[in-house]
Amino acid sequence: MVSPREVFLLSDATGETAESMVQAALSQFGEKPAILRRFSNVRSKNQIYEILDRALTSQALVVFTLVNSELAQLVYEECDALGLACHDLLTPLLRRLAEQLGHSPQEMPGLLRGMDAEYFRRIDAVEFTVKHDDGQECRNLHKADIVLAGVSRSSKTPVSIYLAHRGWKVANVPIVAGIEPPPELFRVDPARVAGLIIEPQRLLELRAARLVNMGQNPRTEYADYERIEDEIRAARRLFRKQRWALIDVSTKAIEETANEILHKLKLNRT
């Protein structure tokens, strides 16, 4: 029997609203599919750090209702850094209401200062990027600020999410040996596409580690050195043919890769 997963509920008030909404959603998944852990009156960065450290031990889903935009953004960024899934229940609704009513809900502590265009832009970018990860929703590639292409385990997703937190709408598309990329990819302005390249040995290590973590045999075609060399050569040829910017991610941190992409695509946002 599979053990129930944990869901951490963070709120700057009682957390009852978040718990009720999550309970309603969980009712569609059968009996006791998850354990809910509620954290009320979360109003400081230290509280968030401590709670997320606890969430990390069980890889819990983090659901939050925080009206303070700085704390909400911190949860997004920390969850991304820790590899935790998270979902903001409150901010998207507040944003839509603010747009409809024509003003921010000023009576709510800290919200007037935080509900600005920049914050909304980042929320939009993160939502877009998550929906367009790993070749999803290719019909909307033309709406992306940046499109990343690369073979499996070439850092497409973490780089996309990092750029999204900086306000860029990013889509990423996997390049798979023997399978034609989606035609929508070739309709995107080449000046907005970056191809991610990685050294074969480094990619071999990443893929083997992934298979081990999944409890699978690392000695497969997916982690075969010669096959990996062929994949990377084919990807490099494709990128050059399409005149896409080439970004070598072999030894770069995520933020270094992101900065190089922005530089080569000549994108800048103050």
Image (tube, rainbow, N blue to C red):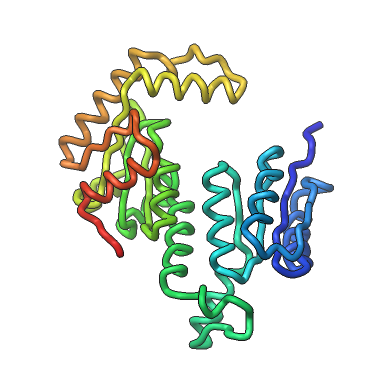
82 or 231: nearer the eye? 82
The x and y percentages for residue 212 are: 57, 20
Classify 104 as above or below 74. below
Residue 42, how many percent across, how many down? 70, 62
Picture quadrant where residue 66 is located: bottom right
Q: Please identify the residue farthest to the right as the structure is shown.
A: 31
Q: Residue furthest bottom?
A: 102
Which of 139 and 18 lies nearest the eye of the viewer?
A: 18
In the image, is residue 20 above or below residue 213? below
Count of all numbered marks drawn on residues in the image = 0
Residue at position x 70%, y 67% in the image: 12
Task: Name the quarter where the N terminus is drawn.
Answer: top right
Q: In the rendering, at what x and y percent does residue 267 appear?
A: 24, 56
Residue at the (73%, 59%) spot, across then down? 22
- Judge left or right: residue 244 versus residue 87: left
Residue 195: percent from left, percent from top: 27, 38
Q: Closest to the observer: 8 or 234?
A: 8
Q: Quadrant of the C terminus?
A: bottom left
- Residue 254 lies left or right of residue 232; in this view the side is right
Q: Residue at x 58, y 63 (%)?
A: 71
x 21%, y 47%: residue:
264
* 197, above or below 35, in the image: above
Q: Residue 211's image quarter?
A: top right
